[in-house]
Amino acid sequence: MSVHNRSRYSRYRGGPDPLAPPVDLAEALDAVAEDVMAGYSPRHALQEFLRRGGHSRQGLDDLAGRVQQRRKDLLGRHKLDGTLNEVRKLLDTAVLEERKQLARDAMMDNTDRALREMQLQNLPRSTPAAVNELASYDWQSSTAREAYERIKDLLGREVLDQRFAGMKQALENATDEDRAAVNEMLQDLNGLLDKHRRGEDTEAEFQNFMAKHGQFFPENPQSVEELIDALAQRAAAAQRMLQSMSREQREELMSLSAQAFGSPELMAQLGQLDDNLRALRPGEDWTGSERFEGEEGLGLGDGTGVLQDLAELDELSEQLSQSYNGSSLDDLDLDALARQLGQDAAVTARTLAEIERAMHDGGYLRRGADGDLSLSPQAMRRLGRALLRDTAKQLSSRQGRRDTRVAGAAGEQTGSSRPWEFGDAEPWDVTRTITNAIRRTIADGGDPGTGLRLAPDDIEVAETEARTQAAVVLLVDVSFSMAAQGRWVPMKRTALALHHLITTRFRGDRLQLITFGRYAQTMDIGELTALPAFRDKGTNLHHGLLLAGRFFRKHPSMQPVLLVVTDGEPTAHLLPDGETWFDYPPDPETIRITVAELDRLGRAGTQVTFFRLGDHPGLERFIQRMARRVNGRVVAPDVGDLGAAVVGEYLRAHFRGRPYGDAEWAR
């Protein structure tokens, strides 16, 4: 095979990796949901996750830290006297070589030699003044003359490199024709910018300019505006570099610049260019400065490049902060990030942007009519499923049961079957279901031997003994002590797990979520999940029991089940006019009417379970007395075991004391 036809493989560069796995949103969704339950808004929660990053992924704060460290490294490594030092070295070389030549030249008139030596001996201590004084000196040493000419060449290339990156290297060993080409480019460029300032330029003029001078612009601008942007950023960085120097350094460079290429015309063209760019891009930072504290000298061109790097790092820092209105990770300049921190940083930022985009576009966050974000039903289902799995593991571990499969909502099987209906949780009658599918396939002219596909109408479920459906109220305390004692998020996780269980596995039951603080109110699962912690004082169990009774009365044929989660005695009750009465220690009237409302629910046959959080003796005595009045139960779980305790009690009530497995209902 010819060597020219061989394939070469290397690391993929440029753009997203086409072989990279899709972004996993599970970690992001869990983190966002956890913060939402803790009281953050979904927007803030997503921003916090993107800042923190994941277990194996850096976040925006990590990238911002790397940006600041690179900025610190640049300032701590460099100083801005590189060009001045190079000029001093060339000047010292020229003077030394000239003195050597004078000492060797026996044919020279002694008077002439003495005058020359005196001039060299009495050169000003200032480097620019010495360079300027020697501008008309008749050098006897060719080596000295070459060193001095290199000063003018260096200055010319440096001042051009300040405005056009790479010019210092490009013009090394340049000819007079090369310098003339640069001068012509500057004249044409200033002419184009003058016209653009007046609005008189045309696209054709820009294209002609680029066709003639395009080699000076490696950025390959596609319009005059792009050309101006690139030039103005560089020129502004050059000005900031001068402002970052000491006054003495700045004055020396300004004095030396007159010697650039030995061409005052060049400096005039560059001055006009700066004026044009300032007028066209006044928004650039033309007056800023930086404090360099290192030892590595920088020339004018390289120093300007470092100032550009610092400006780019500052812009990246602002982008990574995401602190401005309308901020989005799509704003991140990935190319700049790769230049400054490496390709790995760009990949990290791109992944974070994909997560942000997928959380919005993937349906996990939705925007309400008021413009605020909230967790979508899809996100709630996914989170509820995960929480329910965790609850099942806790129950299995706590009860010591094996992971068995049982019929979710069914009672004892009767031996008969019936067609499946939406919402049924009874087990399938597999034999009758397969028989129905075979019959249908034959009736449709198919051959069951070549394959069998089930249709919904084929499915039959095993009939069970009638089971009383349940109307379930989860009554949760939202007084501020719940948040202060670290019980806020576990309470919400419990509600979400129970909600997911009932709405997916026990659809015949009905669930009402009621919160009680100073007042009580019914909530859907989305409202409860996003509920912030209130500082209002009050534990109005009375109002919560009133709302629970109203819900039970709406479902008279269902078994009422009341699950109460609280960490305090009642300290508030509802007055006839709808206002609330609060007092601490609890007012006897608050206790009286709360107990009366509980008794009313007990007489209606409500199964009541209290979940006591905290070990206060007064609370313990009160809850025990309340439970005994209605033949209820009291569970005192650790806060981390609250979800398993509540779900376990619901299942106990659901199965009326029969054993239940932990796996099937949690799937």
Image (spheres, helix red, strand yellow):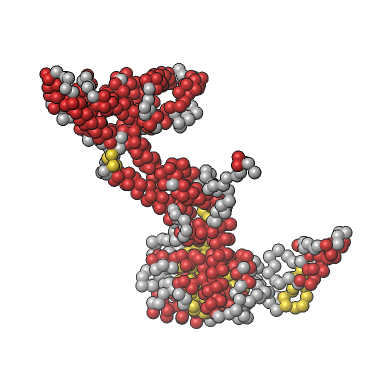
Query: In the displayed structure, does residue 582 sit left or right of residue 122?
Result: right
Q: Residue at x 51, y 19 (%)?
A: 204
> Can you say whether 603 is above or below 553 in the image?
below
Q: Is residue 109 left or right of residue 25?
A: left
Give 464 or 549, whichever is nearer the viewer: 464
Q: What is the quadrant of the C terminus in the image?
A: bottom right
Please provide percent x and percent y for residue 327: 45, 44
Q: Is residue 183 visible?
A: no
In the rendered image, residue 273, in percent from the top left (x then y), is placed at 36, 23
Residue at 50% in and 50% down: 351
Question: How many numbered circles does the render carry?
Answer: 0
Q: Is residue 441 in view?
A: yes
Residue pictured at 86% horizontal, 62% vertical: 447
Residue 516: give x, y in percent of width and height: 47, 66
Residue 425 placement (x, y as % from top left)? 68, 69
* Image point (46%, 50%), residue name: 344
Res 114 → quadrant: top left
Q: Nearer the viewer, residue 532 or 2?
A: 2
Left of 311 or right of it: where is 623? Answer: right
Please tell me whether residue 278 is drawn above or below residue 195 in the rendered image: below
In front here: 587 or 55?
Answer: 55
Q: Nearer the viewer, residue 240 or 268?
A: 268
Quarter containing the N terminus: top right
